Amino acid sequence: MRAEPVGSGVHVPLLHRELVALAAPTQVWSAQDGTMTGGAHGVFHGDWRYVTGLELLIDRLPVAPISTSEDPDWFIFRAVPLDPETGRPRSRVTIERMREVAGGAVTERVTLVNGGGEAIDAVIELSCEVAFTPVASVRAGSPAPVPISLEMEGDEVLVTDGTRTLRARSRGGHLRIDGNRIVVAQEVHVAHDDWFGITLELELIDSSLVLHGTDGPPLADELPRSGRPALDRWMKRAVADLDNLSLDAGHGAFPAAGAPWHMTLVARDALIASRLLLPISTGLAEGTLRTLAARQGVQLDPVTGEQPGRILHSMQQGVTDALRPGVEAPPVYAGSTDATPLWIVLLHDAWEAGMPLETVRELRTALHAALAWMRAATGDGFLACTDERGMGVAGKHWTDDAAGMRCSTDEVGVATAQVQGLACRAAVGAARLLDALGDDGEPMRLWARRLRERFRAQFWVQHEGIRFPAMALDARGRPFETLVSDIGQLIGTTLLDRGEEETVARLLLDDRLSSGFGLRTMATDADRYWPLAHYCGAIWPHDTAIAIEGLLRSGFGDEARNLAEQLERAAGTFDGRMPEVYAGYGMEDTPVPIPHPAACSPHAWASAAVIPVRTALLEGSASTRPHDRVAAVVGLVAHRSVDAPMRSTPPAPSRSRAHLHLVPSAPSALD
């Protein structure tokens, strides 16, 4: 992609240093001190940003922040006001600012506390800049606000664009309109050892929303502490974040993909997150299954990608990001390869985890339709993406752009190894479901067996002395001979035999994939590897978690624990809120994982990744011993074999491997 020229005015907002308070579908983004200064900052509701700035002034001067603290239901920002005459902090006076977010509502409370020996006079002013802007344009770095009207309506301010409405109220202050700003102000006289407060209350209304927040019970009761602080922090925050990401479209709760850009239904994200969470709850799984079944394809529509039996890819409130110049996805888009087998897998696994067979029976028609689509899409070959609208592979499978894979409008596109694993696991699980429902599961078992045979004959490659499953086959059946983390998602699917699973399990601990903080999406010696490239080197926690889940299912407890320790290490650095993705630099480059500046956080599947990690660390193989810092990165030499040799040494000089190049701060750093 060509970079925008300097001075173009396009600045894609970065998120890795920002603070978010959310209760789906509402979210508030700011700096860590609570101020809003541009970029992704603002008050969002659904697919729109309503407020772009929020400013607090005391006697017309900004306050000096001193701390930020978080409670499950609010944030508190503490600051000191400045003396208008000296510019120095006022003695024994503090400001406490509380931010509370609920679905469709945001409240800011400002309290001036006078701990001095004399009364003080001050002017408190809290203002918000209003601009109704589609989220897609904010994400693109070129916000495109629509025309709005602001007017006083009694003691309230009413803002609308004809579809969306913001109502502003205050307690303790006087509201006024100043251009596109809503201002609440109050002159106060505060006695010594006393306080005074004002509030700004925003109500956000969008009659076009089809996805709403939920008021159901929490995802899970508090689990017993593990004695591992980083894991416990991750677990606690993940459960809270998943509760705050929960949405409902009328068929039960499901997790929104992630904040701020994907506060909506993205099928693969919801299906994967719900599956990872099954050990603690089947509630989100049932809601996700029912929501997607209610929108399953029934006709052929080349515009949306709808096909009979196909599970949709995503729902939006309006026009979404351009997938490439001149091409935009519709509000409901079904052009995904992996969503349908993922739906079948979740239905089976939720039933195994305790979801009643009667619920499965209610979804029996959707199951048969999904299986018919998967069989038709696969034919006598592989499950591959077709591109009805010329969108490229965006929306097709989770590694949308790895190695430049593309689908054209007039042929079957690439077939990824990861999707074949899903299809095989879906077929085997469906066979068990069909048997339980009184149908005949044997045809699906035969279908899976034939898929395994084709996969074994065409996907396995030998590259630079190493045997592994190719990342994908192109439209002509030629393999992409690139080692990627997707191979970890094949374990436990029944696509591989035991010997093949052992080969893949060893490769996962090779230091080209295994970073010490999780699995890189692409091996470091690949031509297209770059640690900040989303699908060509960065680390996605859910990707590693799926590998851990499969390793546990297939009895590779030691390998699962190794990878789990890597994610636990990363979670400790991110204070328990795992981002959607982070850079693929390894422990030989940096002592802590490096954030990816554009990652969504919180994100549903990154949060849900804690469950297989917890299982591997607390319930995995009893024979597994914690590995030391180096072994966690490079794997165990004893696991090497002729079939799948591991390399813990750096790749050949002809390969470009990205490392951090740091100027040492002291001579000892060179030792």
Image (cartoon, rainbow, N blue to C red):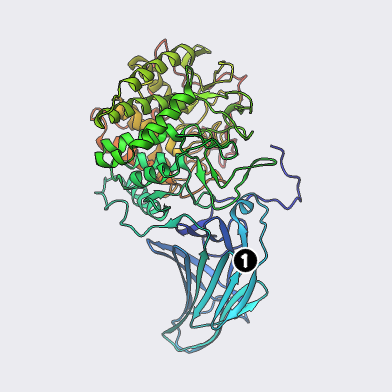
Up the image or down, 162 lies above or below 404; here it is: below
Q: Position of residue 527 (x, y in %)?
A: 60, 23
- Residue drawn where x is 59% and y is 45% of the image: 330
Q: Is residue 380 visible?
A: yes
Q: Amino acid at mark 1?
A: Asp
Instruction: Describe the element under mark 1 as helix, strand or loop.
Output: loop
Q: Position of residue 662 (x, y in %)?
A: 59, 38
In the figure, is residue 285 to the left or right of 573?
left
In the figure, is residue 506 to the left or right of 65?
left
Q: Position of residue 361 (x, y in %)?
A: 29, 38
Q: Position of residue 504 (x, y in %)?
A: 40, 21
- Residue drawn where x is 70% and y is 51% of the image: 10
Classify the position of the N terminus by image quarter. top right
Name the residue nearer the viewer: 652 or 368.
368
Q: Quadrant of residue 292?
A: top left
Q: Determine which residue is flagged by label 1.
A: 161
- Residue drawn where x is 70% and y is 41% of the image: 326
